[in-house]
Amino acid sequence: MQQPPTARREPTTRERHGEAFVDPYAWMADRDDPDLLAYLEAENAWAAERTAHLQPLADTIYEELRSRIRQTDLSVPVRHDRWWYYSRTIEGEQYPVDARVLLTDHPQRPSLEGGAVPAGEEVLLDQNAAAQGHDFFAVGGSEVSHAGDVIAYAADLAGDERYDVRVVRIATGELLDDAVRATGGSLAWSIDGRHLFYTRVDDAWRPHQVWRHEVGTPGEADVLVHDEPDERFFVGVGASRDDRHVVIAIASKTTSEYRILDAADPLGTPRVVAERRPGVEYDIEPVGDRLFVVHNARRTNFEVAVAPITCTTHEQWVPTDVTSEDEYVTGIDGFDDFVAVSLRREGGTAVRIVARSADPAARGGLGAAHDVEVGEPLHTIRVGANPEPATGTVQLVRESLVTPRTVVDYDVATRASTVLKQQEVLGGHDPGDYVQRREWATAPDGTRVPVSLVHHVDTRLDGTAPGLLHGYGAYGIPSDPWFSVLRLSLLQRGWVFAIAHVRGGSELGRSWYDAGKLEHKPNTFTDFVACADRLVAIGAVAPDRLAAEGGSAGGLLMGVVVNQAPDRFRFVHASVPFVDALTTMLDPSLPLSVIEWEEWGNPVQDPAAYALMRSYSPYENVTPGPHPALLVTTSLHDTRVYVTEPAKWVAALRWADRDRPDAAPVVFRTEIAAGHVGQSGRYDQWRQWAWETAVLIDSVTPAQPG
């Protein structure tokens, strides 16, 4: 192929709010159109040809990644009822094996002593066996019955996040039921193990109903438990920590409602905990006769309240004042003797342990509190897997840009941490070989924006180093520091890696999120550019060797900066990018559109929202002119961001570049057997990541040896 593919142009005019937009690639909305599939195949062929010279480098990076990972390994076993539950991986196999052993056989946590499988192991789900014959395999919900003899799991076999449910007898592997198909993925058992609760999706692939299935009966006999007609709301179902309650969550981007059902009475009617109130979000944690509630009815940053388990109105919520107004409460895990409150403060994460008191008048029955010490100024800490409410310890997970993921048992009485497992880096890893720190950029409106960065101790910050800036900035999802084995391949080559904590995430509290959504969305884009400028200003990176990456809504961010600040970046990787945002938001029939009007605005009815999205939507703002080298990656079966969006964007970029022989390259690759998060098998993922990293390195430092 001498030239990149050219997609056919078929102009279609869209008229909204007095504005006409000519869309030459609107035909790509039909994902079954043979011309679209042919175009994607041609782009894949062009990508393979354009990057063929990088195969040795990609192979080298793959081997670096593979050699640092212990491929036969065991997760931290977690105690629940009479068992230790864990998953293990086997060298050469793509997927984990979920299994358990009896506590009576293993008084202490089991291990892969000498590489041998723990004695008396019962396999719950061998995902490798279940995945046979399928190019894609992913598990949604997976739940063991209360009696412990049966497992139900929901499997996605295409990448479209539609899950078929299988019920299996653990001891024999006998398939008991596979009548429930095309679900939303979440599951919950009744106490007697006869009934299984699950969600169904509507034509826009929105989980909108909860159904009850009696194991062994036809799916047609299932009973509707809850139907949510408001298209702004998603529905989920799960079990409480003690399995006593089936919990139904109903939420939009700004409002939520919960219903609970006694799991011992599966034929009963779920009870509303507190009726939805516009703008009020809450979450619940049932523990014994108490209900812990995290809500924002009085505070922007949420707070913790306590209510009786029989609660039916918010008027029964008793404030606890265990957090302050400048601390953003993100969750609560309740146990018999204490609660663990997850929160954010000063741009970082924290876990607060609060003792439960016998005196209900004392802060709603909560007593003394203390925060878990981490010992690292730039870190991420969260509550791990803790299925047992009767415990004096809590599993916590912590990591940083230099410290591998570490799972600890935290004794709430002694405040001592016992390391259960730290992510192993074969060949050795010394955190002291790397430097991490936080910088602050200044946005055009004067707002200070945090930037986390890491580099090898030998990398000189003299304005010559190559760098990669990561960004997301949407839905209130923070980009907290995380450890990456793959990233070591960059850091050891002298790269600087940075995270732009832009508005639209929640790093600095709920107001940080609110300041990057709806009419404030442009803040996300200008924040990211300000972070890039800060890295250059302090000499952390060379101005002509800076790359950027982002996926999904972060891919929208990438598309905007390519249009608005093309001179800042030498290379941009946009993964499953939401780059035709306005077209998507104008179509209520598409997945996520209606529920996301509260995130982006409703351009169907609001001319101002239309005008704002029209001003930044990447596809509709492509113009001829210089742009960075681009890698665009997507998946054919992605249901969150249709393959249509990046395909249209790339076609528009190619058309804009048609008379520019010196235009920077655009490489576009579609994974055929994959979904929103890419391929499912771990070795396939590693190959994909290695190739993407090779493209990055070659685009920014083409003379750099592998």
Image: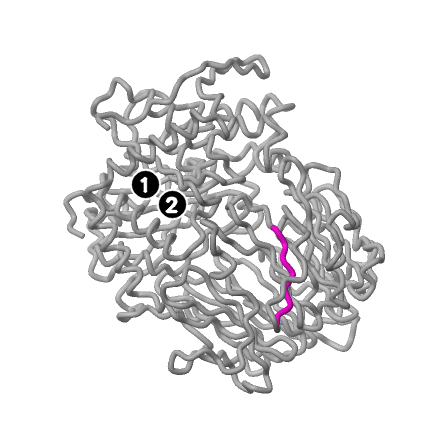
What is the C-alpha distance between the residues marked 1 and 2? Answer: 8 Å
Mark 1 touching mark 2, by CB under 8 A?
Answer: yes
- Which residue is under mark 1? 533
Near-viewer residue (232 or 689): 689
Is 90 left, or right, of 478 in this rendering? left
How many marks the image carries: the answer is 2
Would you identify the image quadrant in which residue 536 lies? Answer: top left
User: Which residue corresponds to the image point at 70% horizontal and 52% vertical from the top-left?
Assistant: 249
Residue type, mark 2 in image: Ala
- For label 2, count other residues whose C-alpha is less than 10 Å away and answer few (under 14), some (14-19) or many (20+): many
Q: Is residue 225 visible?
A: no
User: Which residue corresponds to the image point at 56% horizontal and 46% vertical from the top-left?
Assistant: 161
Q: Is residue 70 visible?
A: yes
Residue type, mark 1 in image: Asp
Near-viewer residue (439 or 135): 135
Near-viewer residue (475 or 390): 390
Question: Residue 620: x, y in percent?
Answer: 45, 23
Question: Residue 511: x, y in percent?
Answer: 57, 46
Would you identify the image quadrant in which residue 543 lies? Answer: top left
Question: Residue 567: x, y in percent?
Answer: 28, 32
Asked whether residue 168 is drawn in magenta, I would say yes
Near-viewer residue (19 or 638): 638
Q: Which residues are magenta?
A: 164-170
User: Which residue corresponds to the image point at 48% horizontal and 80% vertical from the top-left?
Assistant: 118
Tag 1 secondary structure: helix
Seen in the picture, residue 319 relative to 445 is either above or below; the reply is below
**Quadrant in which the N terminus appears:** top left
Asked whether residue 318 is drawn in magenta, I would say no
Question: Residue 145: x, y in percent?
Answer: 68, 67
- Which residue is under mark 2? 441
Seen in the picture, residue 507 relative to 117 is either above or below; the reply is above
Tag 2 secondary structure: strand
